[in-house]
Image (tube, helix red, strand yellow):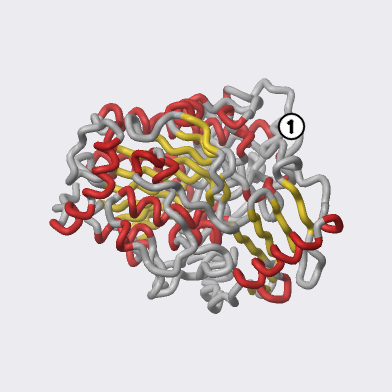
Amino acid sequence: MRMRRVPTVVAAAALSVAALVVAHGQGRSAASPPNIVFILADDLGSADIGAYGGRAVRTPNIDRLAAEGVRFTQAYAGSTVCAPSRSTLMTGTHMGHTPVRSNTGGVSLRPEDVTVAMLLDAAGYATGGYGKWGLAEVGQPGVPEKKGFDEFFGYYHQIHAHEFYPAFLYRNSQRVDLPGNRGFYDGPYGEGRGAGPIAAVDPATGARREFSHYRIVEAMKTFIRNNRDGPFFAYGAWTPPHSRWELPEDDPAWALYEDEPWPLAAKTAAAFTSMVDRHVGEVMALLRELGIDDRTVVFFASDNGGLTALNAAPLWSNRPLRAGKTTLYEGGLRVPFVARWPGTIPARESDHVTYFPDVLPTLAELAGIRDRVPAGIDGISMVPELIGAGAAGRAQRAHEYLYWEDADVDWNAVRYRGEETLRQAVRAGDWKAIRPRPGAPLELYDLKIDIGEARDVAASHPDVVARLARMMADAHTPPPPQVEPERVGGRSYR
């Protein structure tokens, strides 16, 4: 257990949030900022969750989390894909400014980049990360233990995180071998790559295989137990339900769907989501067991929309949104986002428009260090929306606009093709504009009446198109070099 003394200056700074809590009718100590748990699922569509209208997949624990907290209906990821989205979350900057914009897997945060974990670490929080980092390869300046985490256990290079039976994981850049998985990805898969449940024991060697996600969740729970006296920041950057869908055959979630008359891919994808739900329930049960439930604010979100291929029967992962992951349409960007803090965050639905850059200033304010947020970030604290404007003592600020961009990767050369393939999107009020390729005319959608982005109304609103085009131009800056580390032995990750 890592024991931390909250510095006097931090305890004083915490008065700002603690005063809000007292004003909201609670009596917690002014020197005790809340514990923070942030669970980030991978490629989870909003409609995969019952609380967001899903009907195919069973998610009782996430549904309960949403019912007991605030469920955002207009929350967005930072990007259409994994690594850039995490970059916006960690740094509070949108895609026109964030340092990691390539999704090749090993592009690193820079030494000068400040993360939310660094702010919380400096404020006296114990900080642990569990799952997929995706913002540096081992040996680079952006590894999590150099970016504010006391411990990070899981995958560093995000291509490595595509493996649920890896031969090894990393803890603070030190390799942790999983000997039962040796050879799983080196040859034939036997059961079929991503094709359903996987035998718990390798039939060729008799070795018991180890499903990485189980190990990662247990490490996160251990961190919470060891730091129960708080304050702590537990970042669960879990890899499921990202395909490939290689679920252990004895996982209870598989039994929920094995008899459904669905394609195998749909059954295993649904089982992965229900497994994530079960582990959310385990974390929540642990907080109650430790007696710290009412001292802990829990966030749950997805790093981008669900797969476009799953936005069809029987799952309809993003319905009624258009398309899915890798696209700038709502299905690729709009995500489930829930926050729960008993007695402080009123249970309700919110239509406040927010996205991942808002996480850094929000968590900093909850920790009582609002004054330490770096200048020039794009995020806006949503604490007034979380606890109520009256309790916060100020109204919730809204964004003038939200901005996203993405670009292609040349996978042969493992090169980010930024400016030459740049695609952009802006949301301002209910208007959403998309530039599908460099130089192309903007598409324009009125999300108030067309959430499915079925009717391009650009021709009828040239003034709106011109205004949003100016926002796109203002928001985009050329990225720093998106350098992928040299491959070792022909493999993407070390």
Q: Residues within 10 Å of mark 1 (few under 14, many from 20)?
A: few
At 68% from the left and 55% from the top, the residue drawn is 326
At 56% from the left and 29% from the top, the residue drawn is 51
Q: Nearer the viewer, residue 96 or 171?
A: 96
Asked whether the viewer can see residue 203, the reply is no
Residue 444: x %, y % from top left: 77, 55
Label 1 amino acid?
Pro
Residue 248: x %, y % from top left: 53, 35
Residue under numbered circle 1: 263
Q: Residue furthest right?
A: 459
Q: Nearer the viewer, residue 21 or 480?
A: 21
Horizontal side of 11 relative to 139 (left or right) equals: left
* Residue 380 image-quadrant placement: bottom left
Q: Is residue 304 above or below residue 136?
A: above
Secondary element at image label 1: loop
Residue 382: x %, y % from top left: 44, 48
* Residue 123 image-quadrant placement: bottom left
At 65% from the left and 66% from the top, the residue drawn is 471
Horizontal side of 213 relative to 219 (left or right) equals: right
Horizontal side of 80 relative to 462 (left or right) equals: left
Q: Residue furthest top?
A: 259
Residue 377: x %, y % from top left: 45, 65
Asked whether the viewer can see residue 436, the reply is yes
Q: Report the label total.
A: 1
Q: Is residue 280 above or below residue 354?
A: above
At 28% from the left and 38% from the top, the residue drawn is 21
Q: Nearer the viewer, residue 355 or 386?
A: 386
Q: Is residue 72 above or below residue 438?
A: above
